[in-house]
Image: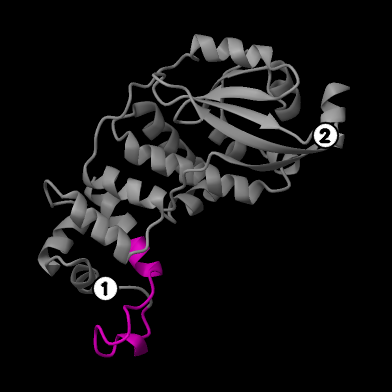
Amino acid sequence: MSEGIGAFLQSRRGRAGPPPAGVFPGAQSRRVPGLRREEVAHLAGVSADYYVRLEQGRAVNVSDSVLDAVARVLRLSPAEHEHLRNLARPGGGDEHRPEADPGTLRLIELMRDVPAMIFGPDTTILATNALADTVFGFTPGVPMNGARYLFLNPRVHALFPGWRDLADEVVAHLRLQAGRRPGDTPLAGLIAELRATSTDFTRRWERQDVLRKISGPVLIAHPALGELELTYQLYPVPGSGGQHLAAYGYEEGSTTGKRLRER
């Protein structure tokens, strides 16, 4: 835990920019970007010693007010703020469930004109409907993990023209989940595997980025159907141990809709 919070805070200090003018003499003219530990402590209203202990993972019973102040000083996004809380006060997270929620599984089976799938917190794809298999090239009934699919399958680069942005999002999602679920063995194993086998993953992982995103565009260059312009939407499945339903919609009357209906 201490390595996690230390690396995260150091990365956010490095991008925070210099302190406000006049707060620390000479701070504006230095060559090193970002904030020093003692500057974060001063601006957050805590002692330098306490902030050092926080960054080293040695602070206990860290209050919300301290974490809120540090997040404000470092200009953390809501997802980064949540990640800081998770690293400072780790919990077990929800129980990891290896099977798709039955009610949600029936729902995606009924979604015949929209690609849809159910995935777990470690991006394991627990279920897909027939159209998702067609669009993404999945083999029906064969277990699949979204992060492995993205980083260890070279053919995926051609399928997703926006692969780099998608890869950034997936890694940032996994880091947020790792903070939420420090005792999740499958998740930890996946991250270790990808760090050992993919330089693209490792480079992104070391950025310490976290992201909570529920919708966005996806462009697919399908070898048989042609270009597909989709928009994904994620829906959390209550009581499922972190599962989400992902549905990929399209504009009414669009070429994408026509191609999917006539496939």
List x then y, in percent, for residue 37: 23, 69
Q: Residue 67's mark?
A: none
Residue 78 visible within the image:
yes
Observer-nearest of 24 and 189: 24
Task: Name which residue lies at 52% across and 43% down.
Answer: 213
Q: From the viewer's perspective, tell me whether residue 228 is left or right of residue 53.
A: right
Which stretch is magenta? 10-32
List x then y, in percent, for residue 51: 17, 62
Q: Residue 36's mark?
A: 1
Task: Name which residue lies at 19% across and 72% down.
Answer: 42
List x then y, in percent, for residue 212: 47, 43
Looking at the rendered structure, the kind of residue marked 1 is: Arg
Looking at the rendered structure, the kind of residue marked 2 is: Thr
Q: Is residue 202 above or below residue 125?
A: below
Q: Is residue 173 magenta?
A: no
How many numbered tags mark residues here?
A: 2
Q: Residues within 10 Å of mark 2 (few under 14, many from 20)?
A: some
Q: Residue 256's mark?
A: 2
Residue 56 visible within the image:
no
Q: Quadrant of residue 95?
A: top left
Observer-nearest of 208 and 247: 247
The quadrant of the rendering that contains the C terminus is top right
Magenta-drawn stretch, dominant element (helix, strand or loop): loop
